[in-house]
Amino acid sequence: MAVTLDFAAAALLGILVGLAELVSRYRDAPHAALYTRPALLYLALNGAASGLALALIRVFDWKFGAGADTVRWVQLLVAGAGAMALFRTSLFTVRAGDRDIAVGPATFLQIFRDAADRAVDRLRARARSLQVGKLLDGVDYGKASEGLIPYCLALMQNVPDDEQKKLVQAVKLLDAEPIEPAVKVRILGLLLMNVVGPDVLTAAVDALREQLKT
């Protein structure tokens, strides 16, 4: 029973690590990213990797310098939170062009994890495109870049200064691009969505729609 609980705990820790990674990548709407099949696959891979890591730790009796009374918990933490680091030991080296690439268990796990992550990204990209296109239809880019950005940031209370500076810098670069205003305003919407999320952006556009019309 204790062994089963240990593997379940390690897998749960691995899933939580994967959950934190997905939330950090898709900050505009993490809940929308998580409710997808690729995201569930990504979490399952993280959990399976942690369970496998714990099995290897127990087989080879790695104690990581822990005492007899704490070794069980240390093994669980290493397997749950550091499975990918544990698997980074290379089995062989492949020559690719002018580079030597170490190949080990983590290489194969990372391939599947990256594929699941990209699938989540593609699904979110489609949803974001449809949402921002509908929301900003008929909005003037010049008016939006001048008024919508400070309004969105004013609505938020805890946007870090570095994120605000990155947003302003990105908009300056966008201003200089020779792109149609109708395309620019959608890119502006995506930039804002990354910072404040779709709900705040929707509320801001709805509140200022009359002032932002072309």
Image: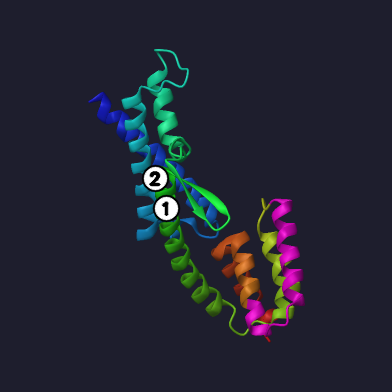
Q: Residue at x 43, y 38 (%)?
A: 87
Q: Is residue 175 magenta?
A: yes
Location of residue 27 with respect to 78 vertically, above or below: below
Q: Which label is found at residue 23?
A: none
Nearer to the camera, 1 or 107? 107
Q: Amino acid at mark 2?
A: Asn
Q: Amino acid at mark 1?
A: Arg
Position of 83 compared to 200: left or right? left
Question: Residue 180 placed where, x, y %?
Answer: 67, 85
The residue carrying mark 1 is 113
Question: Residue 120 placed where, x, y %?
Answer: 44, 61
Location of residue 83 with respect to 75 vertically, above or below: below
Nearer to the camera, 57 or 203? 57
Dots 2 and 1: beta carbons under 8 Å?
yes
Query: Dividing the picture into quarters, in which one does residue 86 lie?
Result: top left
User: Within 10 angstroms of label 1, few (less than 14), some, or many (20 or more) residues?
Assistant: many
User: Within 10 angstroms of label 2, few (less than 14), some, or many (20 or more) residues?
Assistant: many
Location of residue 178 with respect to 95 vertically, above or below: below
Q: Residue at x 50, y 48 (%)?
A: 21
Secondary structure, mark 1, is helix
User: How far apart are the alpha carbons under marks 2 and 1?
Assistant: 8 Å
Q: Quadrant of the image for the N terminus?
A: top left
Q: Residue at x 31, y 26 (%)?
A: 59
Rendered image coloring scheme: rainbow
Position of 207 compared to 113: left or right? right
Q: Residue at x 47, y 71 (%)?
A: 127
Secondary structure, mark 2, is helix
Q: Is residue 54 magenta?
A: no
The residue carrying mark 2 is 46
Nearer to the camera, 202 or 207? 202
Magenta-drawn segment: 160-185
